[in-house]
């Protein structure tokens, strides 16, 4: 099938200008160009307007401070990585020291921690009991005032002793 | 680019800064030039070139000598510059339209104005400014760096026909711009 103008112009703007056409494609294009003055005109105009527009482009030189900036960033990144890896090493040392402790010592330490935790929580339990006791007595007095006692609650006539028992 | 030996790459990968400086000296000119042409702005090129060398330094251990070092560094440069442009265009949405010549010349503040002014006269910066970053990357690698289609495709990690279509669209835009004068 003969090449159409659109395909010919696509090739002119790419492979033809850049010298990337293979032999077979080149022959097809040449054949089209021979019979198409409009595409010949298009190629001439494209070459005239595009060729050389970047030919004299000067190379932009890197500024002198660029290398200093790169060195500084690499040094800064290495220092940060060093700090992070130092912390990791320290954590690893601590963890391995813990696992090096003999098993009986470890068991003793764990038991001691559990006992201390229980002892520390006892005052909290006692204080919760006292709280409940005082709330119960206060509720009783309030409901007594509005005549709503249901007979289940019993007013403790000796609150002081009750509180002392719970302290 | 002058040759970068395998020994130099291995030493730099092990953290030898002198070796890395040699690599920098051998490659910085084309890295900076590609970064500048793709971003089309001096200050952005400074930032991109710095990022390219930091990424190169951090990834040297992973350089497997399967491709040439030049292709590898081209790839990092083009991709870093393109990502920079895409991020920049997202953050610039809704702002005043970018004027490549005015922007580029006024952005120069360190004795580089002469080159910028000369380039503005020759419209290189302005012409590249009419292209989108993907088209610009293809044009820069083809017209300024002289890479063939396969190398451009490898560098940008795209299909060779995508290279063709980007070059075609870029040249159509350039033709319209040049004809308008």
Image (cartoon, grey):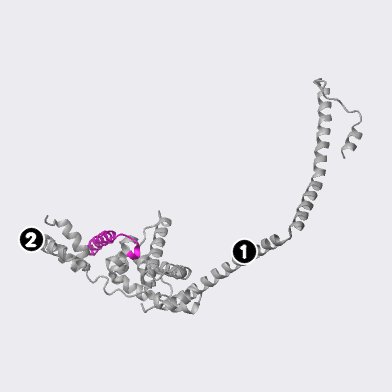
- From the top left corner, tell me how far across and down residue B151 is, in percent: 31, 67
For marks 1 and 2, the one nearer the N-term is: 2
**CA–CA distance between discs 1 and 2?**
76 Å
Which segment is the magenta one? B154-181
Q: Quadrant of the N terminus of chain B?
A: bottom left
Mark 1 or mark 2, which is nearer to you? 1
According to the picture, the residue beneath numbered tag 1 turns out to be A88
According to the picture, the residue beneath numbered tag 2 turns out to be A35
Pointer 1 with pointer 2, Cβ within 8 A: no
- From the top left corner, tell me how far across and down residue A38 is, in percent: 11, 60
User: Is residue B172 located in the magenta-colored stretch of the structure?
Assistant: yes
Q: Quadrant of the C terminus of chain B?
A: bottom left
As helix, strand or loop, the secondary structure at mark 1 comes to: helix
Q: Are marks 1 and 2 on the same chain?
A: yes
Q: Quadrant location of residue B75?
A: bottom left
**Is B177 on the left or on the right of B42, as rendered?**
left
**Is A49 on the left or on the right of B151, as rendered?**
left
Q: Quadrant location of residue A83?
A: bottom right
Main SS, magenta region, reads helix
């Amino acid at each position: 099938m003969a090449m159409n103008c659109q395909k010919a112009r696509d090739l002119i703007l790419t492979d033809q200008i850049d010298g990337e056409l293979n032999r077979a494609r080149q022959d097809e294009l040449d054949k089209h160009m021979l019979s198409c003055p409009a595409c010949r005109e298009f190629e001439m105009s494209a070459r005239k307007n595009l060729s050389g527009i970047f030919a004299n482009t000067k190379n932009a030189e890197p500024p002198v401070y660029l290398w200093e900036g790169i060195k500084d960033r690499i040094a800064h990144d290495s220092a940060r990585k060093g700090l992070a890896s130092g912390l990791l090493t320290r954590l690893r040392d601590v963890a391995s020291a813990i696992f090096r402790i003999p098993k009986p010592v470890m068991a003793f330490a764990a038991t001691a921690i559990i006992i201390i935790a229980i002892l520390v929580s006892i005052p909290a339990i006692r204080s919760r009991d006292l709280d409940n006791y005082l709330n119960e007595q206060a509720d009783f007095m309030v409901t007594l005032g509005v005549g709503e006692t249901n007979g289940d609650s019993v007013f403790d006539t000796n609150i002081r002793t009750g509180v002392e028992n719970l302290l | 680019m002058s040759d970068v030996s395998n020994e130099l790459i291995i030493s730099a990968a092990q953290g030898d800064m002198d070796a890395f400086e040699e690599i920098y000296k051998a490659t910085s000119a084309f890295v900076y030039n590609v970064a500048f042409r793709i971003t089309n702005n001096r200050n952005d090129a400074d930032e991109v070139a710095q990022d390219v060398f930091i990424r190169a330094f951090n990834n040297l251990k992973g350089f497997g000598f399967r491709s040439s070092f030049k292709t590898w560094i081209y790839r990092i440069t083009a991709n870093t510059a393109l990502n920079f442009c895409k991020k920049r265009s997202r953050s610039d949405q809704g702002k005043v339209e970018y004027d490549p010549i005015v922007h580029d010349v006024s952005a120069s503040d360190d004795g580089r104005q002469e080159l910028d002014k000369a380039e503005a006269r020759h419209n290189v910066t302005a012409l590249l400014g009419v292209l989108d970053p993907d088209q610009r990357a293809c044009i820069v690698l083809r017209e300024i760096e002289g890479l063939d289609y396969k190398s451009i495709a490898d560098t940008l990690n795209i299909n060779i026909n995508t290279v063709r279509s980007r070059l075609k669209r870029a040249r159509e835009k350039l033709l319209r711009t040049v004809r308008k004068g």
